Image: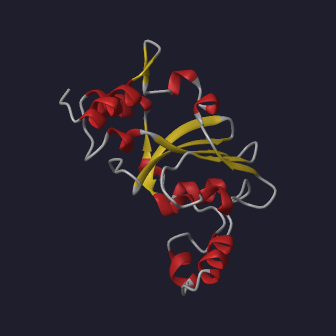
């Protein structure tokens, strides 16, 4: 699966002291479907819990205990940082370089959830209860060797985005 801005997102995950990148549909990372369902209903929308759960192996809350089981279903979404860097350098993205910007950091070991998702879905509100969850930057949490967008100290995504905003070709 290729990253697509605000749809197929890039997520840094730590489980059992191992860091991995995932590229998957954004809804995969709503860890507490019960909180999400409640918010949906409060806003006047119907929510079919049975439909949602069939895509989650009937897991309501993806927490530290359930993470390994849940993530096993998304094994094919794991991607190496070298592959992400190649996509960035070879311009293998649709529409905007921001498709290659990491959106979330999820640390199941330390119960940390940080969203840098650029659109209106507040992922951080749907983290399991008791987790440290917030909206903010995630770079400081990503191991340096995994920061595929930093080359020779330069943020390549930021530089390419400046070019996009000016309407210039690279």
Q: Quadrant of residue 116?
A: top right
Which quadrant of the figure contains the C terminus?
A: top left
| Residue 114 coordinates in the image, percent (x, y) | 64, 46
Q: Is residue 47 above or below residue 107?
A: below
Q: On the picture, is 17 further left or further right than 30?
A: right
Toward the front, the furthest residue is: 166
Q: What residue is shown at x 63% (from left), y 61% (from top)?
A: 31
Question: Is residue 168 toward the left or the right of residue 29 in the image?
Answer: left
In the foreground, 76 or 46 = 46
- Residue 27 vertical placement versus 139 (above, below): below
Closest to the observer, 163 or 109: 163
Q: How many numbered discs, if any?
A: 0
Identify the residue shown where x is 65% and y is 81%: 42
Residue positioned most to the right: 130
Q: Position of residue 17 (x, y in %)?
A: 68, 35
Residue in the picture at 30% in, 37% down: 165
């Amino acid at each position: 699966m290729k990253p697509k801005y605000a749809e197929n997102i890039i997520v840094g995950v730590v489980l059992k002291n191992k860091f991995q990148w995932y590229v998957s549909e954004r809804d995969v990372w709503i860890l507490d479907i019960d909180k999400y369902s409640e918010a949906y209903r409060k806003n006047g929308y119907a929510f079919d819990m049975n439909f949602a759960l069939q895509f989650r192996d009937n897991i309501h809350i993806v927490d530290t205990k359930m993470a390994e089981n849940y993530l096993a279903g998304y094994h094919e979404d794991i991607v190496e940082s070298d592959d992400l860097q190649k996509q960035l350098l070879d311009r293998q993205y649709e529409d905007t370089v921001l498709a290659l910007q990491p959106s979330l950091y999820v640390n199941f070991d330390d119960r940390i959830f940080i969203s840098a998702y650029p659109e209106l879905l507040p992922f951080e509100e749907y983290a399991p209860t008791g987790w440290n969850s917030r909206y903010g930057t995630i770079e400081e949490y990503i191991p340096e060797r995994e920061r595929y967008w930093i080359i020779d100290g330069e943020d390549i995504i930021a530089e390419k985005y400046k070019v996009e905003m000016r309407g210039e070709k690279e």
